[in-house]
Image: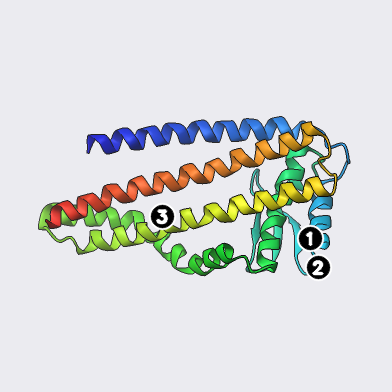
């Protein structure tokens, strides 16, 4: 168990560092003006139209770093600083979210798989913490391992979802960077490097989250299997 806490503590430390680096990078590139002068909304609209997508609405969503694409109602939701921003960060984030819309339009397999998982993941994520807690207590006092097994199963589902998210995020960034370069929106080496750097650190937050979920899953799984033996 001690090795688990060392690994988990290490991942938590890395997670905090990655989050800090991502926010600092975003702040830096939010202050780097885009030479084209386009806003995040302008970029999102152009990227969608360039891919023949006209049925996706671009919305200004409340909250910092709240940017996301919603395949259910086909909306690209951009935070105010991205929606109205004329920076390298705004361009990168807006193009990335539109990358998800392009994935949707082209029936990208990993996005389809991820979307199909959403209903069950929503249920699993809402129950997992309490079920694991109750399961551990029940197994300790009565030897009943069935509740913990349900919690481990729920955690396995959310962990799988975290890993399925990775190719979706990396592919969206790849599409975004390629389009920004091809259209000359990030035509200078400084702008291209900034957009790539910002998206890379954003992707790393998903990587760390997936690894953290995996380590937690292995911990509870080993607890369950150890008691059952």
Mark 3 is surrounded, within 10 Å at the Cα level, by few (under 14), some (14 to 19) or many (20 or more) other residues, namely many
Q: What element carries label 1?
A: helix
Q: Tell me if I can see residue 61 in this picture.
A: no
3 or 2: tag closer to the N-terminus: 2
User: Do the residues bearing badges 2 and 1 touch, measured as CB atoms within 8 Å?
Assistant: yes
Q: How far apart are marks 2 and 1 (CA)?
A: 7 Å
Give coordinates of residue 63: x percent, y percent. 65, 46
Q: Is mark 2 on a helix, strand or loop?
A: loop
Q: In which quarter of the image is the C terminus?
A: bottom left
Location of mark 3 (residue): 159
The percent coordinates of residue 168 (x first, y second) are: 58, 56
At 24% across and 58% down in the image, what residue appears? 148
Quarter occupied by residue 128: bottom left
Q: Mark 3: which secondary structure?
A: helix
Question: Along the line of sight, which residue is nearer the eye, 116 or 58?
Answer: 116
Q: Name the residue under label 1.
A: 48
**The label number, if any, that marks residue 207 in the structure image:** none
Q: Which residue is drawn at 20% across and 64% down?
A: 146
Name the quadrant containing residue 87.
top right
Determine whether, in the image, residue 200 is placed left or right of residue 75.
left
| CB under 8 Å between discs 3 and 2 | no
Q: Mark 2 points at which residue?
A: 54
Q: How many marks?
A: 3
Q: Can residue 198 be seen in this view?
A: yes
Q: How far apart are marks 3 and 1 (CA)?
A: 31 Å
């Amino acid at each position: 168990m001690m090795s688990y806490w060392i690994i988990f503590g290490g991942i938590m430390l890395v997670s905090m560092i990655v989050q800090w680096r991502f926010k600092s990078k975003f702040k830096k590139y939010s202050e780097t003006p885009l030479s084209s002068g386009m806003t995040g909304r302008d970029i999102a609209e152009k990227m969608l139209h360039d891919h023949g997508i006209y049925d996706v609405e671009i919305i200004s969503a409340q909250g910092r770093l709240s940017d996301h694409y919603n395949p259910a109602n086909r909306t690209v939701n951009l935070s105010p600083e991205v929606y109205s921003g004329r920076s390298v960060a705004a361009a990168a984030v807006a193009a990335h979210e539109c990358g998800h819309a392009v994935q949707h339009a082209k029936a990208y397999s990993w996005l389809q798989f991820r979307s199909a998982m959403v209903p069950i993941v929503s249920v699993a994520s809402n129950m997992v913490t309490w079920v694991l807690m109750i399961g551990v207590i029940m197994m300790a006092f009565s030897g009943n391992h069935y509740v913990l097994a349900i919690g481990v199963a729920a955690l396995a589902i959310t962990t799988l979802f975290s890993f399925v998210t990775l190719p979706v995020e990396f592919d969206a960034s790849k599409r975004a960077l390629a389009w920004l370069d091809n259209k000359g929106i990030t035509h200078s080496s400084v702008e291209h490097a900034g957009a790539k750097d910002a998206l890379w650190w954003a992707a790393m937050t998903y990587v760390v989250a997936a690894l953290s979920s995996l380590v937690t899953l292995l911990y509870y799984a080993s607890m369950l299997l150890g008691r059952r033996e």
